[in-house]
Amino acid sequence: MLCKHFPKCGGCQIQNLLYDKQIEYKINRFIDIFKREPDEVIKSPKIIYYRNRMDYVVGPNYEVGLKEYGKWYSYVNIDECFLQSPESNIIRNKFREFIINKNLKPWDTKNYTGFIRYIVIREGKFTNERIVNIITYKTDNLEYYKNIFFEFYNEIKNYINSFYWTINDTISDVSYGNINYLLYGEKYIKEKALDNFYYISTNSFYQPNSYTAEILLKYVREFTDPNENDIIYDLYSGSGFYAIEIGKYSNYVYAVDNNKENFEMFNLNKEINNVKSVKFLLSNVENLEKINADKIIVDPPRPGINKKVIRKILESNAKKIVYVSCYPETQKRDIDILINKGNYKLENIILVDQFPHTYHMETIALLSK
């Protein structure tokens, strides 16, 4: 069924295609990039209500939804979205009604005026836990707005476990900030992947599709093939999603990430899963003096692996590299460097449809020497 907001809404780009045709489109895109077919193609177990996080922007005319596709200053007022959950739809629509009734002025990204900026909803698909975070501009009336937001909390408290207010006091149009208030409920929520539990805060990283996240975790473990004496680095590790699983099999696992919120979640994840062999290095990956590893897991942001990091990976002479990517163009660039300069061989590369109805896909590559 086609969403009534398609194709204007920027949330989906190929929803008009039947799902098998979407997969065919992504396979062809993969072949265009890698000049070969994927060794395996894995569909998303769910193609609606699969996302565990949605960042709904508030437009100047009280639109609450997503940006129009390709237009930074145009907003789509969404009353039904098939990406997250029915509960998410209820919360978002109640929020729109609430800010209109309370005359809470939306933030204007052109004129830098107003107050309400985003509502972020995160949820555990396998735990049914949910966190809501309201993002605003700064104010001198903290207690007044805490009381106002308490009224909204009462409207949605049956759907959520945690309720935050975050202040972004910059003009940057982002759905996070440097001042966070836990107004009601639990500090964090949890999600489950395979046999592991993972804590999630307002802005820590977690794979956005909980159903394919389990698939990624399974293949990363299989490709890494850890044994107890392996020294394994998990670069750009987030809150230790892969490292926690790998730490069950190896005594020397190092997760590297520069985000303090991810570091906090990692320590909780390590404790709840009773994994003692993993250490977190709070650092930019490129600032590591060296990488002394037998095997390396890398899951970088869209720009790919930093040139300094590639050089250190090559110097490490690791026998295996497991490369997870949400942006195959930069992954292909990096793989070519590792093959040409490090004598690695591309053993396997898998396409995972982590983002149904969009152009995007996830790929997992195994390189070895």
Image: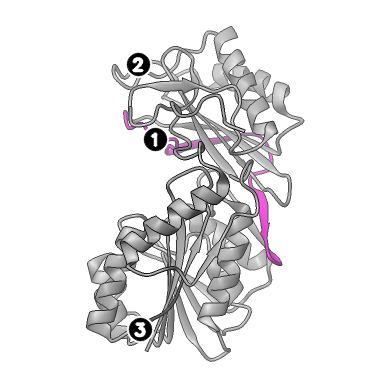
What amino acid is at disc 1? Val
Q: Are marks 3 and 2 in contact (CB under 8 Å)?
A: no
The secondary structure type at the circle numbered 2 is: loop
From the image, tell me which residue sits under label 1.
174
The secondary structure type at the circle numbered 3 is: strand
From the image, tell me which residue sits under label 3.
345
Q: Which residues are magenta?
A: 171-196
Q: Is residue 70 left or right of residue 57?
A: left
Q: Earlier in the sequence, mark 1 or mark 3?
A: 1
What amino acid is at disc 2? Thr
Residue 47, magenta (yes or no): no
From the image, tell me which residue sits under label 2.
113
Residue 254: give x, y in percent of width and height: 47, 75
Q: Is residue 361 something one can see in this rendering? A: yes
Q: Earlier in the sequence, mark 1 or mark 2?
A: 2
Q: Quadrant of residue 171?
A: top left
Which residue is painted at 56% across and 14% down in the image? 99
The N terminus appears in which quarter of the rendering? top right
Q: Are marks 1 and 3 in contact (CB under 8 Å)?
A: no
Residue 108: give x, y in percent of width and height: 36, 18
The residue carrying pointer 3 sits among few (fewer than 14), some (14 to 19) or many (20 or more) residues within 10 Å by Cα, namely some
The residue carrying pointer 2 sits among few (fewer than 14), some (14 to 19) or many (20 or more) residues within 10 Å by Cα, namely some
Q: Earlier in the sequence, mark 3 or mark 2?
A: 2
